Image (cartoon, rainbow, N blue to C red):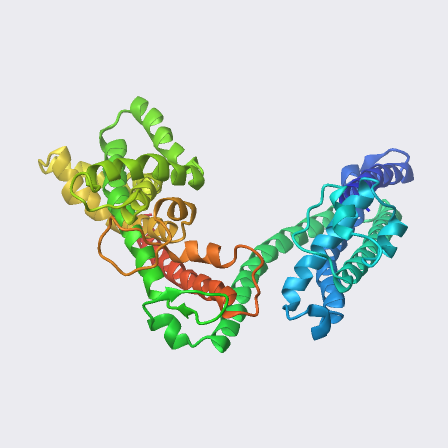
Amino acid sequence: MSNTLLALIVLALGAIGYVIGRQRALKATDGDQRKLHSLPSYYGTNVLLKTMVPAFLLMLVWLLAQPIVVDRSVRAGLQDESVRQDRSVSLVMTDVRRVANGLGIAVEQGVMSRDEARSLDTQSTDVRARLGEAGVALGSDVTPAVLEAAQQYRGLSGTGDIARFALVVALALAGLGWGVRESTPSFRARNSVERGIKSLLILASCIAILTTIGIVLSLVFNTIEFFRIYPARDFFLSTTWSPSFGGGSELGILPLLWGTLYISLIALLVAVPIGLFAAVYLSEYASKRVRSVAKPAIEILAGIPTIVYGLFALLTIGPLLLRVFGDDTVGWMDGGTAVMTAGLAMGIMLIPFVSSLSDDVINAVPQAMRDGSYGLGATQSETIKQVILPAALPGIVGAILLAASRAIGETMIVVLGAGAAARLSLNPFEAMTTVTAKIVSQLTGDADFSSAEALVAFALGMTLFVVTLGLNVLALYIVRKYREQYE
């Protein structure tokens, strides 16, 4: 059953409930609104909320829980070594999902019937060929165990879809009946609606908080699992990064941390002076007309996708640096991908972060401090250097730290501009890599999450999370201290 169709049905029932609830309340008083406790629209809204909210919540929870339950049910039959054929359960489940999705596509396109999809047999049918007729390509042969598990997967998913459709519609109808029954003149519909809206607002806040908690817990649990397999001492102190899914990996984070911090440092050396000077000009020297054009133009840089910056680094900055510092000139640079390439591109990306935040901080400095400085005979430049910038320094430092945390978490610019070499070097014209780039590479493809080589991505993510969280907390502390001083 289509989720879109189910959602439209619930929306339609909600709209019908609104009309019925409103009309029922008015009919009970012969159209005299003064005899109602609340406005007629509140009675309709009460029915609408009772119809839609519980139904959509059940639908959301079901959509989240069903894949987990189906996966566990199918996994239970794949624990036997003879079924898995020396592969991990995760890899077998990947094949099961592909075949199950392929069967679903084949049924939708009419290549095979539902009954045929349930009874398909590898001994008498080439499954890859049949699915190929529907445009579904499989990377390997389908074993009888995988096909049987895929058919079970589709069967359980289909049963779950039917049950979800029936229960959601039934709950919506029950809510509609409940709301309509409450639509009497003495019912406090406004109070009920306001409580319902307040509950929805609280739920929205809880979802945001629970999402954050879920992200942290997923990192923590997988990081703990990684350190059960790989020594924490080697991870944090080793200077070699050499993963190998065949075994014998050396997973030291130091070269990745060094590349992350080195590229971020170069980016800040580009972004901080340019962004700060731009902020000073916009806030102290530029006319209103120039400011109205220049400030949005600078902030356009913040809206450019990072993949575009990565392509700019790869196609423009890298070749330009290679012509200046390459083998034909000073010989410092061997290729276009290097720390300097990624750092310059990232620095350009960070300019609006530093500029916009610093501009807001400088404008927040009280005008009385400027007037006092001018009254003592100081020039505009002396006022900026000796009064405004020192007063705005805490806020500017906070802006820089926020930009630094943004630089540390960047991925696409690094992947395209910095290369993939994990090394400890001071040469900014050599290729290096960062923590985020290696997280992507370790989780690309069909990763076996029972191996240290895949789980190391979560340990890298947890380390990066702690670093950026520390920078953000420090930045917020400085900014709040500044605001308490001048607001």
Quadrant in the rendering for residue 356: top left
Q: Residue at x 73, y 57 (%)?
A: 142
Question: Measured from the top left, where is residue 330 in percent x and y?
Answer: 15, 42
Which residue is at 26% across, 48% downward?
266
On the rendered structure, is 281 left or right of 226?
Answer: left
Q: Does residue 197 lie above or below 44 as drawn?
A: below
For the question of whether residue 128 can be seen, the reply is: yes
- Residue extending farthest to the top is 289
Image location (x, y in percent) of residue 400: 30, 49
**Residue sitting farthest toward the left:** 377
From this viewpoint, is residue 46 visible? no
Where is residue 248 shown, x and y percent of the image? 44, 72
- Please state the horizontal and vertical placement of residue 24, each as a whole percent of the image: 89, 40
Q: Nearer the viewer, residue 227 or 121?
A: 121
Residue at 70% across, 62% down: 68
Picture layout, residue 238 above or below residue 403: below
Task: State whether residue 459 is above or below residue 269.
Answer: below
The answer to which of 480 and 484 lies nearer the viewer is: 480
Closer to the camera, 264 or 129? 129
Label tally: 0
Judge left or right: residue 415 versus residue 338.
Answer: right
Closer-to-camera residue (362/464): 464
